Image (cartoon, rainbow, N blue to C red):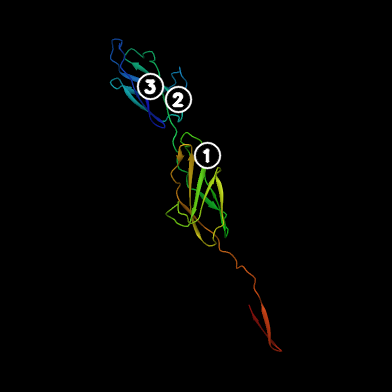
């Protein structure tokens, strides 16, 4: 019997052979395959007195077949009937630390890498939180971007201001944990606006300027 416990784990149990061949069972070998009817690869062994096994590092969202072979001092038994379990997907791993660059007085770029493990379902979107609050990515004090790619440009920012950034991946099973927080400072800007210069003669040799 095979029971799925987590997205990449299955719990296996079986009965001892009705006939041990006249010798004590010394071990069980557990094989795993994603193809029905194939024994596949050895994934673990147990002592002859143990008839349960936790199979890990399985492919997510995949029907997986398990076969157990008994062993005694003479050799291996024929393969028993296989049991199948369907592993399930989960939300992806978090995004690693985002990278900010190319700051201007009102914008900067944000890039990141896809999670090393998508949880068994493709990433469908990334949520990028750009906030003034360093403690609350869900604060409404600035912007949240939702994009399909690994890049976004934050725009409409205030000059000479520190912003805090988090990135979150999403697949069909939900949103990942937040990435580590990073910060970026927008640049100060040159003065803006027209200067009105007024010149007024003070004497034949002097002019005063005001603006």
**Can residue 28 be seen in this snapshot?**
yes
Identify the mark at residue 30; answer none if there is no mark: 3
The N terminus: image quadrant: top left
Of residue 124 and residue 97, the one placed in the foreground of this image is: 124
**Can residue 56 be seen in this snapshot?**
no
Of residue 76 and residue 98, the one placed in the foreground of this image is: 98
Q: CA distance from mark 3 to mark 2?
A: 16 Å
Instruction: Judge the density around disc 2: few (<14), some (14-19), many (≥20) Cα neighbours within 10 Å.
Output: some
- In this view, the residue farthest toward the right is 204
Q: Residue under circle 1?
A: 124
> The residue tagged with tag 3: helix, strand or loop?
strand
Q: Is residue 177 above or below residue 67?
A: below
Instruction: Judge the density around disc 1: few (<14), some (14-19), many (≥20) Cα neighbours within 10 Å.
Output: few
Marks 1 and 3 close (CB-CB < 8 Å): no
Horizontal and vertical percent position of residue 18: 30, 12
Horizontal and vertical percent position of residue 119: 46, 36
- Does label 2 or label 1 sit earlier along the sequence? 2
As drawn, is 132 to the left or to the right of 2? right
Q: Residue at x 57, y 58 (%)?
A: 106
Horizontal and vertical percent position of residue 156: 56, 57
Give residue 93's quadrant in the image.
Answer: top left
Looking at the image, is mark 1 or mark 3 nearer the viewer? Answer: 1
Horizontal and vertical percent position of residue 47: 30, 22
Q: Residue at x 50, y 48 (%)?
A: 128
- Does label 3 or label 2 sit earlier along the sequence? 3
Q: CA distance from mark 1 to mark 3?
A: 36 Å
Q: Is residue 151 above or below residue 141?
A: above
Q: Residue at x 32, y 24 (%)?
A: 52
> The residue tagged with tag 2: helix, strand or loop?
strand
- Does label 1 or label 3 sit earlier along the sequence? 3
Q: Residue under circle 2?
A: 63
């Amino acid at each position: 019997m095979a029971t799925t416990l987590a997205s990449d784990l299955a719990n296996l149990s079986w009965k001892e052979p009705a006939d041990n061949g006249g010798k004590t069972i010394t071990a069980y070998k557990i094989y795993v395959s994603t193809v029905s009817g194939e024994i596949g690869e050895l994934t673990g062994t147990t002592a002859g007195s143990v008839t349960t096994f936790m199979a890990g590092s399985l492919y997510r969202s995949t029907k997986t077949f398990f076969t157990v072979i008994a062993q005694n001092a003479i050799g291996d038994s024929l393969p028993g009937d296989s049991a199948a379990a369907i592993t399930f997907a989960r939300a992806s791993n978090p995004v690693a630390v985002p990278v900010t660059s190319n700051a201007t007085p009102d914008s900067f770029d944000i890039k990141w890498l896809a999670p090393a493990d998508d949880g068994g379902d493709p990433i469908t979107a990334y949520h990028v939180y750009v906030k003034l609050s360093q403690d609350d990515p869900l604060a409404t004090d600035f912007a949240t971007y939702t994009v399909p790619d690994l890049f976004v440009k934050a725009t409409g920012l205030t000059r000479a201001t520190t912003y805090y950034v988090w990135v979150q991946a999403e697949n069909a099973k939900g949103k990942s944990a937040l990435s580590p927080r990073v910060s970026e400072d927008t640049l100060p800007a040159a003065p803006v606006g027209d200067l009105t210069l007024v010149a007024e003669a003070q004497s034949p040799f002097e002019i005063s300027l005001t603006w």
